[in-house]
């Protein structure tokens, strides 16, 4: 990006900042500065992912976007706009814990019944069942917690 283009973007951003007070009511509260957004344009089928600097009723100003040709877009040319946000982490943790726990119980059960020892040699294998369930549940819950993000579509105005 040339210094002249960067200066133009900063100038447009300052103008937009000055006019946002009258347009604030028309804005979606999820379109906050710094939010990660995904959008398409009328001229391309590709989706762009960038970091939002400012959203007005008629324009989007981006802080950065690797795949975009520019950092300012009119709302008229934008389609398929979505915001990346955290989902319900507690529910995702519980779901992951449940699936991971079932998988861990199954593996623990397989390990316990595959013991070919006699008498007391396989008694320790019984402990693998609840241990596998607990360990699998914790791993599944952690994975669910860490992946609790989703794209939230914004209605096109």
Image (tube, rainbow, N blue to C red):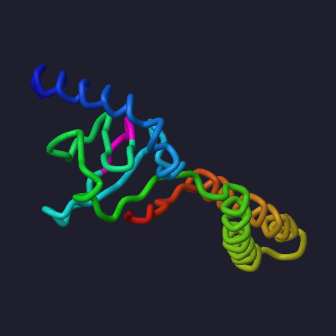
> In the rendered view, would you say 115 is above or below 32?
below
Task: Out of 84 and 28, give the one closest to the viewer.
Answer: 28
Which quarter of the rendering shows the N terminus?
top left
Q: Which residue lies at the image location 29% right of the left edge and 63% below the top edge?
A: 79
Q: Position of residue 131 (x, y in %)?
A: 80, 61
Quadrant showing the C terminus? bottom left
Residue 114: image location, x then y, percent: 70, 78
Taking 150 as reference, is 43 left or right? left
Q: Magenta stretch?
A: 49-54
Front-most of residues 37 and 109: 37
Residue at image position (67%, 71%) is 99
Quadrant position of residue 76 = bottom left
Residue at the image position 39 percent from the left and 38 percent from the top: 54
Residue at the spot 52% in from the left edge and 48% down from the top edge:
25
Where does residue 60 sit, x and y in percent of width and height?
A: 32, 45
On screen, residue 85 versus residue 118, left or right, reads left
Q: Is residue 118 magenta?
A: no
Farthest front residue? 22
Q: Is residue 92 left or right of residue 8?
A: right
Q: Main secondary structure of the magenta part?
A: strand
The number of callouts visible is 0
Choose top left, top right, bottom left or bottom right for residue 83.
bottom left
- 128 or 121, which lies in front? 128
Residue 126 x %, y % = 84, 70
Position of residue 105 relative to residue 147, above or below, is below
Instruction: Give the image quarter of residue 143.
Output: bottom right
């Amino acid at each position: 990006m040339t210094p002249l283009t960067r200066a133009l973007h900063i100038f447009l951003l300052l103008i937009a900042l000055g006019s946002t007070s009258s347009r604030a009511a028309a804005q979606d509260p999820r379109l906050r500065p710094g939010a990660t957004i995904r959008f398409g344009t009328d001229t391309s089928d590709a989706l762009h992912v960038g970091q939002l600097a400012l959203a007005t009723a008629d324009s989007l100003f981006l802080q950065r976007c690797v795949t975009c040709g520019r950092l300012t877009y009119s709302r008229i040319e934008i389609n398929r706009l979505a915001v990346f946000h955290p989902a319900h982490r507690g529910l995702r943790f519980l779901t992951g814990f449940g699936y991971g726990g079932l998988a861990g119980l199954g593996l623990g059960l397989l390990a316990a019944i595959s013991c070919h020892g006699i008498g007391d040699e396989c008694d320790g294998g019984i402990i693998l069942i609840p241990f596998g369930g607990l360990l699998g549940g914790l791993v599944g819950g952690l994975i669910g917690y860490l992946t609790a993000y989703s794209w939230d579509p914004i209605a096109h105005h």
